[in-house]
Image: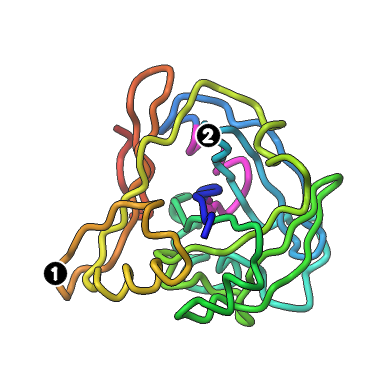
């Protein structure tokens, strides 16, 4: 099926806060990326090895507000309130050479396929009508890059490598069923939680100063 882990997304109220968060948790200064004019957002980017990258994303206060809700849940009041208190790991993205085929065989509504670009980079990506995160961020967004080479090859290499992406969920069987339908079950490690515990993600990253972790939980101290 050729589905692969593409990148992980950190959401922040401002890019400055997101950059500081990465510095505090990983010990590196993530460089600027660019703007997403269709979505009114902007980002910072860096490699995580093996054509995987880390993206810090925030609403661009200088951009015109889009007609539709912003992607990655950035207009969701609950997500906005969380990001106002602290940046956090929002979700993950998987890539495919044929997003239309992958969407058709999926057992979940990942959203409509939108055509996007940022400078020389072009891609197709699933975006839900309300901008919400699939599975509250525990399910991935789907992406198909339209360039000959993966864009992360051009992003700065700061000596960081994604070791694992772990998802903790109270309904692991349901999660695995959805992921298998898009060939993404091998991209993550799944762990079971009690029924009353909210799901969360943990990314373990090898950095120049040792193994660190990023979490979708709020108020987690750096490790």
Q: Residue at x 65, y 27 (%)?
A: 156
The residue that label 2 is drawn on is: 50
Q: Residue at x 39, y 27 (%)?
A: 206
The residue that label 1 is drawn on is: 194
Secondary structure type for disc 1? loop
Tell me, yes or no, whether the two marked residues, 1 and 2, touch with CB atoms within 8 Å.
no
Residue with the most extreme top position: 208
Q: Residue at x 43, y 17 (%)?
A: 208
Rendered image quadrant of residue 44: top right
Residue with the most extreme left position: 194
Instruction: Tell me if residue 14 is in the magenta stretch.
Output: yes
Could you tell me which quadrant the C terminus lies in? top left
Q: Is residue 71 left or right of residue 210?
A: right
Q: Is residue 194 left or right of residue 64?
A: left
The region drawn magenta spans: 9-22
Rendered image quadrant of residue 64: bottom right
Q: CA distance from mark 1 to mark 2?
A: 34 Å
């Amino acid at each position: 099926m050729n589905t692969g882990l593409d990148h992980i997304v950190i959401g922040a109220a401002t890019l400055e806060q997101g950059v500081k968060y990465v510095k505090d948790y990983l010990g590196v200064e993530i460089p600027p990326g660019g703007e997403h004019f269709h979505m009114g957002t902007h980002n910072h980017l860096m490699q995580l090895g093996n054509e995987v990258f880390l993206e810090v994303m925030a609403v661009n206060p200088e951009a015109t507000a889009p007609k539709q809700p912003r992607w990655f849940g950035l207009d969701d009041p609950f997500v906005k309130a969380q990001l106002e208190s602290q940046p956090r790991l929002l979700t993950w993205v998987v890539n495919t050479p044929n997003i239309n085929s992958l969407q058709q065989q999926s057992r979940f509504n990942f959203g409509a396929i939108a055509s996007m670009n940022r400078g020389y980079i072009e891609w197709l990506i699933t975006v839900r009508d309300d901008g919400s995160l699939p599975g509250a961020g525990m399910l991935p967004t789907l992406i198909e890059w339209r360039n000959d080479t993966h864009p992360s090859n051009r992003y700065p290499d700061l000596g960081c490598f994604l070791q694992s992406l772990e998802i903790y969920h109270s309904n692991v069987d349901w999660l695995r069923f959805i992921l298998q339908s898009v060939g993404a079950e091998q991209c993550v490690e799944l762990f079971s939680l009690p029924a009353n515990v909210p799901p969360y993600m943990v990314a373990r990253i090898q950095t120049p100063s040792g193994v660190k972790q990023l979490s979708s939980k709020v108020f987690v101290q750096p490790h």
